[in-house]
Amino acid sequence: MGKKNIDWENLGFGYVKTDKRFVSNFKNGAWDEGALVEDDTITISECAGVLQYAQTVFEGLKAYTTEKGQIVIFRPDLNAERLEASAKRLEMPVFPRDKFIDAVVKTVEANEAYVPPYGSGATLYIRPYMFGNSPVIGVKPAEEYQFRVFTTPVGPYFKGGAKPITIKVSDFDRAAPHGTGNIKAGLNYAMSLHAIVTAHEEGFDENMYLDAATRTKVEETGGANFLFVTKDGKVVTPKSDSILPSITRRSLVAVARDYLGLEVEEREVYFDEVKDFAECGLCGTAAVISPVGRINDHGNVINFPSGMDDMGPVTKKLYDTLTGIQMGRLDAPEGWIKVIK
Ligand code: PLP
Ligand code: COI
């Protein structure tokens, strides 16, 4: 199939309308078969659960063109599993995992012309999501839901791609203990908008959120988990019940241990320790691994030894190995890669 005439190399992380999207509706206690449609708009009740009480959850994954020209997706079973956890937490019906993967595959196939070519630096971002669309006015779950999947070709999440970014320690909290920080709910992102706009106005690329209860421990950013590297080459990643269980982070832990032979610690990370790390990065589907060169904590600046020009050496190895697996240059662990065609 011919590709669309898109300047792949210069794509940012934005929305580009593609040809088809998948839609399935939940009514009378059951999901329908679902279908690919062309219409990118949605008409719902003015009183829909999603509009009134933010009953919506989503996922994010990517389709890649490999070195050999195949189109693949990365660990979609984990996205299906996480969407299930998110839906349950917001009292929404579960979209079956096998149907989730099927819907993602169909949507990518239908938009094959938008899957960026190998080596372009771009990928096809896939956004599955689900929301309450029947009217609710008393605070309760909707009775009807819609599940959709759309795709959009994207470039790097942060301008400059692999260039180190500068972040600030936020004065706002992202997630409360026992709250919804560990699921992918739209509400977590709505409440981070003021913090991110504020950070951007102050010249920072992102926020580091600390734990809401004690403000002593590192949580995550608005859209990615943290990875640190110690001066003796250990990978350290924060563990918390109020951060999103990032699929990229979980994969990188395996890559560090099994491909690179590195020691990995998944544990609580105190902000006080951060100044002693050699490297810092943000990891996620959109972020891949974005190196952090500098953290500003209310005027106290931490400059990582890896500097502001390049990724640190361990971060770079992790990045090269993960993207090598995703782009088919390296053998993947069993079950990580689903070939679409
Ligand atoms: N943390 C947050 C808040 C996110 O929105 C994301 C993005 O999905 C991640 C972490 C990274 O998760 P994943 O690697 O599964 O994309
Ligand atoms: C992703 O990485 O898929 C996300 O959903 C993060 C979002 C901030 C774009």
Image (cartoon, rainbow, N blue to C red):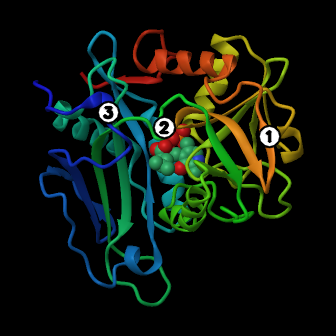
Give the alpha-carbon distance from disc 2 to disc 3, as whole Å: 19 Å
Q: Residues within 10 Å of mark 3 (few under 14, many from 20)?
A: few
Q: Position of residue 167 (x, y in %)?
A: 66, 47
Q: Nearer the viewer, residue 301 or 111?
A: 301
Give the alpha-carbon distance from disc 3 to disc 1, as whole Å: 31 Å
Labels 2, 3: front one = 3
Q: Position of residue 15 (x, y in %)?
A: 30, 49
Q: Residues within 10 Å of mark 1 (few under 14, many from 20)?
A: some
Q: Position of residue 284 (x, y in %)?
A: 54, 38
Q: Which three-letter amino acid code belongs to the residue tagged 1?
A: Ile
When the figure is inspected, residue 216 is found, relative to residue 41, above or below; the finding is: above
Q: Which three-letter amino acid code belongs to the residue tagged 2?
A: Thr
Q: Are marks 2 and 3 in contact (CB under 8 Å)?
A: no
At a point 25% along the width and 36% down the height, the residue shown is: 108
* Disc marking residue 302: 1
Sooner in the amino-acid sequence: mark 2 or mark 3: 3
> CB of residue at label 2: within 8 Å of ligand 1?
yes
At a point 32% along the width and 36% down the height, the residue shown is: 11
Q: Which three-letter amino acid code belongs to the residue tagged 3?
A: Asn
* Helix, strand or loop status at disc 2: loop
Q: Nearer the viewer, residue 88 or 252?
A: 252
Q: Position of residue 303 (x, y in %)?
A: 77, 35
* Disc marking residue 285: 2
When the figure is inspected, residue 300 is found, relative to residue 228, above or below; the finding is: below
Q: Is residue 161 visible?
A: yes
* Disc marking residue 10: 3
Q: What is the tally of numbered marks visible in this picture? A: 3
280 horizontally vs 103: left or right: right
